[in-house]
Image: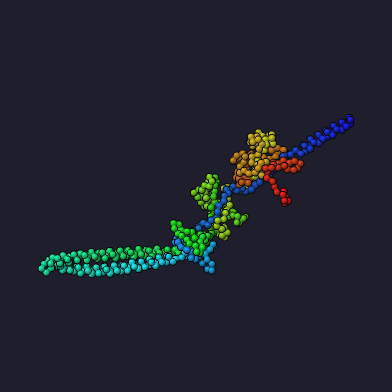
Amino acid sequence: MKKLLLFMVLVFAGGAVGFSYWQRASAPTSVFRTVAVQRGDLLSSISATGTVVPVEVIDVGAQVAGRIESLGPDPKDESKTIDYGSEVEQGTVLARIDNSLYAADVERAEAEVAQAKSNVQRAEADLGQMQARLLQAEQNWKRAQELGPSRALSTADYEAYEAAYAIAKATVAVGEATIAQTRTSVDQAEAVLRRAQTNLGYCTIRSPVKGVIIDRRVNIGQTVVASLNAPSLFLIAKDLRRMQVWVAVNEADIGSIHPGQATSFTTDAFAGHVFQGQVAKIRLNASMTQNVVTYTVEVDTDNPDAKLLPYLTANVRFEVSRRDNVLMVPNSALRWTPAPERIAPDAQASAPAADQARSSGGRPQGGGPGGRGPGGGSGRPAGGAGRGSLWVADGGRVRPIAVEVGVNDGVMTEVRGDLLKEGLEVIVGEFEQNNGNQTRSPFTPGYFRGSRQGT
C-alpha cells in the first residue's frame, strides 16, 4: 500500500508539472506587426466624380411646327442620312419639315403684295385725274376772279367756281394721302411675305456650325410642335478635341480647389489610362441633395485623338500638394496605440503618446491593416493634426518616437523626426500566437491563402 500510495503521489505530481508546462506553452503570446519607414514621393489629392462633356454643344431645334419629311444626306456618304456621329459643315441640311402649309402662306402673301402694288397704281391714276380737275377748277376760278360779280357773271356762278376750286384742291390732297396709304399697305404685305418666306425656310433645318452629331432626337414621320420652346432635334458638338469634365465637389473640399489647379482623371472605358486636365472655373450655383452641398467644377482637358467620348464618367483627382523624396509610413502606424503595460518603463514618463495609451485603457485608435481593431479611418494621427507618434519594438515592449506629420494621401503619411531614418521598423499592429499559430480576432479581415473551394 505504501508503494502504491507513493506511486500515485509521483504520478499526480508529474501530471501537475506537465499540465503547468503545457498551459504555459499553450498560452498565447503577442507578436508585433511592423513595416519599414519608406522614402518616396507623396501626393495629397481630393477625389471626386464627374462627367466628360464637350466644351461647346449646340442644341439645334425647330422654329416651325410640322411633320419631319426627310433627313439630310450624310456629307461623307450621300447614300446615308444624317445620324449619330455624322460630321457636318455649317449650312449642312439636317432635316426637312413638310412645307405645304408654309408654301401656301408664301403664295398668299405674294398675292397680297401684288394687290397692294396695284392699289398704289390705281391711287396714282386717280390722283392724276384729281390733279387735272384741280387745274380746270383753278383756271375757271381765275377767270371768275377777273370778271368778278357783274352782269356777265352772276354772284352764284362766281361762288360756284370758288367752291369747285377748293373742292378740287382738297380732293388732290385726299388722293396723295391715299397713295401714301396704299404704299404703306405694300410695305405691310411685303413684311408678311418675308415672314412667310422665313417660315418656309425654317422648314429646312441646317447646321449652324461645323461639328459632330452626338444626338439625334427625331425620326422621319415624327411631328414637331414649336410653341413657347423650340423642340430639340439635334445635338452638335462643335469640337471634340477640347473637352470638359464637370465635377461635383463637396463643400468641405471646395476651399482647396482653385482655377489653374492641375488634375488627373481616369475613366472606366479606358482603364489604366490617366488623362491630365486643369481647373477652369468653379461655378457658384451650389446644389443641395439630402442636405449635402456640392459645387460644380469645370476641368478643361485636351482630346487630340478624340479618345474621350461625351458623357463618360470620370474619376477625378485634384492635386492639392506634392512632396518629393520624403520619409513616409502607413496611416495605420500613426493610428496604433499600445496597452500601457507594453510601454517600456523608461519611456512612459517622456512619451506624450504613453499618456494617451493610459487614458485610452490600452485600446488602439483606429486599428488599420494588421492592427488590433477593424480597419478604416482617415489616417489622421492619434496625436492630433501636425504631430503624432510612431512605436518601435524594444525587446518585448514598445518605445514611442515623436514625429511631425505632413501630407497624407489616404494610404501613406509624410513624417519628420530626428530619430527617423529610412528602413526603421515601426509597429502597425499586433497579433497573438499560440504554438506558432496566429490567433486572429473575429473582426479582423481574413486573407486568401489558397485556391481550395470553401476556404
Q: Is residue 315 left or right of residue 446?
A: left
Residue 2 seen anywhere in this rendered image of the structure: yes
Residue 200 x, y percent position in the rendering: 43, 65
Q: Residue at x 74, y 43 (%)?
A: 437
Quarter of the image with the N terminus is top right
Q: In this view, does 74 lie above or below 294?
A: below
Q: In which quarter of the image is residue 379?
A: top right
Q: In this view, does 397 lie above or below 191?
A: above
Count the marks: how many? 0
Q: Is residue 435 left or right of residue 272?
A: right
In front of the other: 278 or 155 = 155
Q: Residue at x 83, y 33 (%)?
A: 12
Task: Report the residue that reaches farthest toward the top.
Answer: 2
Q: Which residue is drawn at 48% across and 65% down?
A: 69
Q: Is residue 452 left or right of residue 151?
A: right
Q: In which quarter of the image is residue 5?
A: top right
In front of the other: 79 or 357 = 79
Residue 393 x, y percent position in the rendering: 70, 40
Colour convention: rainbow
In front of the other: 13 or 428 = 13
Residue 179 x, y percent position in the rendering: 29, 65
Q: Is residue 132 left or right of residue 442?
A: left
Residue 262 x, y percent position in the rendering: 56, 51
Q: In this view, does 108 lie above or below 420?
A: below
Residue 236 seen anywhere in this rendered image of the structure: no
